Amino acid sequence: MIVLLIWIAVFIAVVTIYFRQTYSRFSKYGVKHMKVVPFFGNMYRIILRMDNFSEDLERIYNTFNGERFVGRYEFMNPMVVVRDLKLVKKITFKDFEHFLDHRGFTDETVEPLFARNVLSLKGQEWKDMRSTLSPAFTSSKIKLMVPFMEEVGKQMIRALEKKIKESDSGTIDIDCKDLTTRYSNDVIASCAFGLKVDSYTEKENKFYEMGKTASTFNFKQMIFFFAFAAFPALVKRLRLTLFSNQTKDFFVELVMSTMKDRDARHIIRPDMIHLLMEAKKGQLVHDDKNGNENQDTGFSTVEESSIGKKANDRVWSDIDLIAQAVLFFIAGFDTISTAMSFALHELALHPEIQERLVQEIKEQNTKNGGKLNFSLIQFMKYLDMVTSEVLRLWPPALVLDRVCVKDYNLGKPNSKVTEDYIIKKGELVSIPVWAFHHDPEFFPDPTKFDPERFSDENKHNINSIAYMPFGLGPRNCIGSRFALCELKVVLYQIILHFEISPSKKTCIPSKLSSESFNPRLEGGHWLKFKLRN
């Protein structure tokens, strides 16, 4: 019995020493961090669903006011959370080569369709893929896709009009996340794959079902992401995957058969499949010769860096190209539709803003003879103000991540510390987008939905580093122009035809759910739709 007690005591001592050493990375350098729970680190509130991700970010950010950066432990992995915008700028721009990569969430030997996309690739491979794909996302390419978006919008409008006319009250309650996801699904089907899909009349079509499976990251998948980040060797050894074989087979067959058919029949359609085929042949070139690509595309649009405009002759495999198509689908299916649903939510809660927007839309619609095109969308100032504020209040990505690829001196976390903190190669940096967007220092009265922040009179007051809905630096979102254009097109079409208002099921006050990794309102995005007079 005594021997057993001794062994238990030794075991407890060893475990205690191990965790104490594991969680001493920050404290010995004077870097502040929240209290940790052994094994879970600072993740326990998310794991136990006590907080949603945005609340967790704000808690860390707001607890340590005045610190340039603080520490966070994802399970047992240290991560630096940056609070100082000057340091954010150095990490994302000036010293970008030290923080070149995103963290990995899966292994390419296990899940190549995720690991080989432009979001996940690292180092020179990422640079080459970025420069290969960049010409596909210029304004001149996006404007050719607007007619596809418009046609999908007309499908949606017809379906909504039919439901409203059939209702006894002349109004219907709609889960706007479902509405916008179906819209985004059909836009991606058309703009990426050249398929005509109508998810409003054919509710459970295969394209929609596969998209929902591939891009809806529930709580279980959220834990998978963090587990892979913390224990990559174990996840790789167990060959755990994000996507089912059925989902992977669907996308591989879809892309390969479409490419083969177009080659055989010499079909040219200005969509993503065509652009990927051009990229594989080395025939996709950047058409922004004069550096004017950001002109009139909106406040939120991010600029392509010199990396994206540099030519390369790397040969890409079919799997590499399919991986880009899958990423485009996932981003379009969920990320853009989420922004759309939050935009509708805010317009419903603020009828005076909705009324001003509809007046601008009607005016431009009349001037243009009822025709919708890229130039018209970009010309509308108030629409841009509204979308810019939506992306501030409800950013698509709540956090930016970077991996340190070579040791870097972050300086001192505060004025009281005497020793600089050196972040080591392989360690993570987190930039809390949500927290910056909701910091009253940068955005007064931050929880208020106020498009006037982005008026011509006020937008010069915005710190360009504090506003990062599509990321910062060379590793920003390559599809920002497409996303912003699609968001504006759907708002134009919906607000022109329908009056939206809160329903009995609308989440008021707005609160994000802790049940999903993706930003979602508690109880869903329910609103009331009525035909405009």
Image: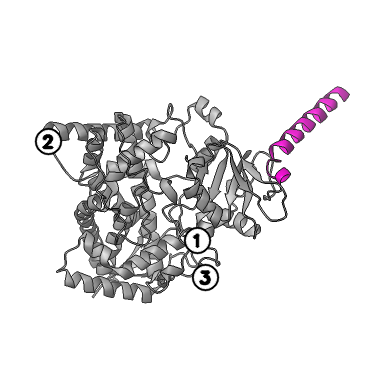
Dot 3: element: loop
Residue 525 shows up from this direction: yes
Q: In x, y percent, where is residue 188?
A: 28, 47
In the image, which residues are magenta? Answer: 1-29
The residue that mark 3 highlights is: 444
Q: State left or right for residue 41 relative to residue 431.
A: right
**Residue 414, percent from left and from top:** 67, 55
Q: Earlier in the sequence, mark 1 or mark 3?
A: 1
The image quarter containing residue 131 is top left
Q: Residue 53: in sight, yes or no?
A: no
Residue 437, which numbered label?
Answer: 1
| Predominant secondary structure, magenta span | helix
Q: Is residue 13 magenta?
A: yes
Q: Is residue 330 above or below residue 1?
A: below
Q: Earlier in the sequence, mark 1 or mark 2?
A: 2
Q: Residues within 10 Å of mark 2 (few under 14, many from 20)?
A: few
Which mark, residue 466? none
Q: Which residue is mark 2?
A: 266
Q: At x 43% / y 38%, what residue is drawn?
A: 120
Disc 3 residue type (three-letter)? Pro
Give amino acid for label 2: His
